[in-house]
Each structure stands twice: as C-alpha cells, then as structure tokens.
Image: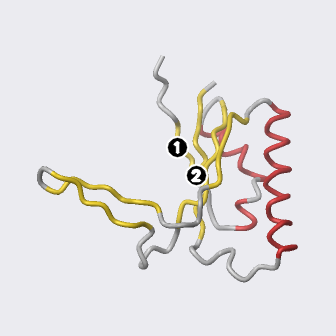
Amino acid sequence: MAKFALMLPHAPDRYTGLSEDDYMGIIKDYIAWVEAAVEKGVYLGGEKLLESPGRVVSRNGSGLEVHESPFTELTEILGGFMIVEAEDYDAAVALCADHPHLVHNQHIEIRQLQDVD
C-alpha cells in the first residue's frame, strides 16, 4: 500500500467568530472520520497545525532570509495534515469522499509520499 498526505487548507478566517458549540461540532466530525479510518486500518497519523504564523525560509546569498507566514495576501493556510494508506490515487480520493474537510472547507490536496525502502 502507498502512503498519501491529505493536506487540509482553509481560509485564514474560516473559524473566526464561530461559537464554541459550532467549533466543537466541526472537531467532532473530524474525530469521527479519523476513528472510521483507524477502524479501516488506513489512518497512519496527522496533526492540526497552530493558527499562529509559521516561517518561510529562503536562501539569500550565503545566508538565510526568514519571514513570518502566512503572508497577508494569502487566501489559504495549511491547517493540518493526515497520512493515510491507499492502493493508489483513486483509492486515496475515495477515502476523501466523506471527509469532513470537504464539508467545512473547500478542498483537500492529496500527495503521495515517496517510498524510501
């Protein structure tokens, strides 16, 4: 089985202003999806990323240039990721068919991890 990263982007203000009950309802949807994926034996892990700015590092001549991210013009931030196992891209897409991210946000980016064995 191949491993795939499900990258979960969202608008920077997506969860701003939600009531605690609404926010917890969304969290419960994600937990239920993960529990079902664990039961199927396809969920390998994942993490929610902090909503505080990350860092973008680039080479500047012989040194490094560091900027806070996300930038103000950014329309999406990466809110988290999940790692799943699937036979191929079609199977990974099928796993996403009932993913709550597609209900509470707009899209999931799926990328296959390179096998290092």
In this image, 67 relative to 87: left or right? left
Position in image of residue 17 (x %, y %): 72, 83
Q: According to the image, label 1 marks what residue?
A: 111
Give residue 45's position: percent from left, percent from top. 68, 38
Mark 1: secondary structure: strand
Q: Which residue is mark 2?
A: 7
Q: Residue furthest left?
A: 61
Viewer-nearest residue: 95 or 37: 37
Location of residue 30 with respect to 74 vertically, above or below:
above
Residue at 68% across / 34% down in the picture? 44
In this orientation, which residue lies closer to the viewer: 52 or 40? 52
Where disc 2 sits, the SS reads strand
- Name which quarter of the figure residue 20 lies in: bottom right
Q: Residues within 10 Å of mark 1 (few under 14, many from 20)?
A: some
- Measured along the vertical axis of the image, is residue 107 above or below residue 42? below
Q: Is residue 108 above or below residue 35?
A: below
Tell which circle, 2 or 1, labels the residue nearer the N-terminal end.
2
Type of amino acid under label 1: Arg
Most foreground residue, 89 or 18:
18
